Image (cartoon, rainbow, N blue to C red):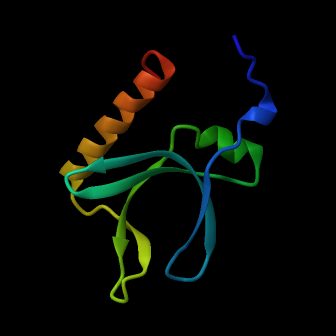
Amino acid sequence: MSVLNEDDYSPDLISLLDDDGNEYEFEIMDEIDYKNGHYYVLMPLFDLPEEEIVSESTYVILEAVEDEDGNPQLAELEDPELTEEIDAIYQLNREDAFGGKK
């Protein structure tokens, strides 16, 4: 049995810029390949601990796409049904990873 200490966990982080050039940092919670698309489930990170507690169950789902020049970027999902399907897969992945509902 191995012991996991705090130093063993380092989250996968990603920084994203919005249309106004503001930078936001997210933890990558999951990556999902589904229906010829690649999706990221991201949890926003905050500077203030109380903001993090409030947002503990807040996450966004973005799709990996290419812009007009072929550069990779992440885009919001516009199809509510697809968003629900990706969310359901994410919830199942969490259940599998944590051995029960979260």
Please provide percent x and percent y for residue 4.
74, 23
Please provide percent x and percent y for residue 42.
50, 51
* Residue in the picture at 42% in, 81% down: 71
Looking at the figure, which quarter contains the N terminus?
top right
* Residue in the picture at 55% in, 83% down: 20
* Residue in the picture at 19% in, 49% down: 81
Please provide percent x and percent y for residue 76.
36, 64
Q: Is residue 65 above or below residue 11?
A: below
Along the line of sight, which residue is nearer the eye, 42 or 7? 7
Number of callouts in the render?
Answer: 0
Q: Residue furthest top?
A: 1
Left or right: 47 with respect to 64?
A: right
* Residue in the picture at 48% in, 47% down: 59
Please provide percent x and percent y for residue 84.
26, 44
The image quarter containing residue 6 is: top right
Left or right: 5 with respect to 97?
A: right
Left or right: 15 with respect to 39?
A: right
Q: Is residue 23 above or below residue 29?
A: below
